[in-house]
């Protein structure tokens, strides 16, 4: 298992590969944090089930994809702080983060699987699930400092946490929907894709989901979740979703450079992002036909081929509203980048 550094940074790093080549599998809880306890005396708790399914999922991916590196946040029964789990994924520039858990409810008949993405809770149930999972930070030393005074028991804390929704949420939801479709194929109750403020997701800068395999508080589901058959079936379902997601992800991003806009003559574009490394198309909220160019040893990405500055300004303002707050206008003469002033003079002539 990759060692965890004690230093944490909030600064996201760009994904180095435009293909899905690194996945972080996070077995929830561990060590002194058992998660939800077993009903059966001496039975497996949430941490045990999550670890077994996580290792099985990683084994399936390792066995079927030579080009994918699997990184585990834990491979045995140890306690790993939530911010270290996120840091591990960020430091390794992973393309996908999958956190595995089991659910619990006062209603012993509650059953089924659900997959969560980062967002604002819409019901008391959503908030309750997030509070239970986030309670792990209370077992950490200096948790208030590590999480900027976030209180997992305070509903108000979740309002600020929900603001971390970003460009990764669309891809997160796509993967979450694939997971739920596979679970439904197992004839398990499909509880759908839901949103809430999970600390481990809020600090992970890539598509990320938290999977609740089933309800450990339901005696029938507990039998299924603790059985070898159940664990293998659930891990295989998540693997099938991963396979479909990777195929789509790789196909979309591998055509990024082929889809350059062919734009001759003087024109204006809207630059969206720049990075030391290539950026996956999935990070542009579904915007296609991006123009990639290198300048000052950086990869830069621009949109459009506008013959008037006015049209470029309108598009820039729209893109800012869509989340690209740093978008700005640049100009080209065919493949050569020129200043806005030069473009204005040339187009007037």
Image (cartoon, helix red, strand yellow):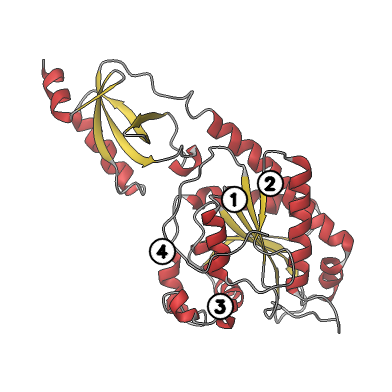
Which of the marked residues, 2 or 4, is nearer the chain's N terminus? 4
Q: How far apart in space, not on screen, are marks 2 and 4 (Cα)?
A: 27 Å
Which of the marked residues, 1 or 3, is nearer the chain's N terminus? 1
Marks 1 and 2: CB-CB under 8 Å? yes
Q: Which residue is mark 2?
A: 242
Instruction: Where is residue 163? Give x, y as percent.
Output: 41, 63
* Crowd rating for badge 1 (residues with CA inside 10 Å; few <14, some 14–19, many 20+): many
Q: Is residue 44 left or right of residue 14?
A: right
Q: How far apart in space, not on screen, are marks 1 and 4 (Cα)?
A: 20 Å
* Crowd rating for badge 3 (residues with CA inside 10 Å; few <14, some 14–19, many 20+): many
- For residue 287, which quarter of the picture? top left
Label 1 or label 4, whichever lies nearer to me, is 1
Which of the marked residues, 1 or 4, is nearer the chain's N terminus? 1
Image point (56%, 78%), residue name: 137
Label 1 or label 2, whichever lies nearer to me, is 1
Q: Which residue is mark 3?
A: 137
Residue 96 is tagged as 1
Image point (53%, 50%), residue name: 93
Image point (33%, 19%), residue name: 263
Marks 1 and 4: CB-CB under 8 Å? no
Q: How far apart in space, not on screen, are marks 1 and 2 (Cα)?
A: 9 Å
Label 2 secondary element:
helix
Label 3 secondary element:
helix
Label 1 secondary element:
strand
Q: How far apart in space, not on screen, are marks 3 and 2 (Cα)?
A: 28 Å
Instruction: Where is residue 115? Give x, y as percent.
Output: 64, 60
Q: Is residue 192 left or right of residue 302?
A: right
* Crowd rating for badge 4 (residues with CA inside 10 Å; few <14, some 14–19, many 20+): few
């Amino acid at each position: 298992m990759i060692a965890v550094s004690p230093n944490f940074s909030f600064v996201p790093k760009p994904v180095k590969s435009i293909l899905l080549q690194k996945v972080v599998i996070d077995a929830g809880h561990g060590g002194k944090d058992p998660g939800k306890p077993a009903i059966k005396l001496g039975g497996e708790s949430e941490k045990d089930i999550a670890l077994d399914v996580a290792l099985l999922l990683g084994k399936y991916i390792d066995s079927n994809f030579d080009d994918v590196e699997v990184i585990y946040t834990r491979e045995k029964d140890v306690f790993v702080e939530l911010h270290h789990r996120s840091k591990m994924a960020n430091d390794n520039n992973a393309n996908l983060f999958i956190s595995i858990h089991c659910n619990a409810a006062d209603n012993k008949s509650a059953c089924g699987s659900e997959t969560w993405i980062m967002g604002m809770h819409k019901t008391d149930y959503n908030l309750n699930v997030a509070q239970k999972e986030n309670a792990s930070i209370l077992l950490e030393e200096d948790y208030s400092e590590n999480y900027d005074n976030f209180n997992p028991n305070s509903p108000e804390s979740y309002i600020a946490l929900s603001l971390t929704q970003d460009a990764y949420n669309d891809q997160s939801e796509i993967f979450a929907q694939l997971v739920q479709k596979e679970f439904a194929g197992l004839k398990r109750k499909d509880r759908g894709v839901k949103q809430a403020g999970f600390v481990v997701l809020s600090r992970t800068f890539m598509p990320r989901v938290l999977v609740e395999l089933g309800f450990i508080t339901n005696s029938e589901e507990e039998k299924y979740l603790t059985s070898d058959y159940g664990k293998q079936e659930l891990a295989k379902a998540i693997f099938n979703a991963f396979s479909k997601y990777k195929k789509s992800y790789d196909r979309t991003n591998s055509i990024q450079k082929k889809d350059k806009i062919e734009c001759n003559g003087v024109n204006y574009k809207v630059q969206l992002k720049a990075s030391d490394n290539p950026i996956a198309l999935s990070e542009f909220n579904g915007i296609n036909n991006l123009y990639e160019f290198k300048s000052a040893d950086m990869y830069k990405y621009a949109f459009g081929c506008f013959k008037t500055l006015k049209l470029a300004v309108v598009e820039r303002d729209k893109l800012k509203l869509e989340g690209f707050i740093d978008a700005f206008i640049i100009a080209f003469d065919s493949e050569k980048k020129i200043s806005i002033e030069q473009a204005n003079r040339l187009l007037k002539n």
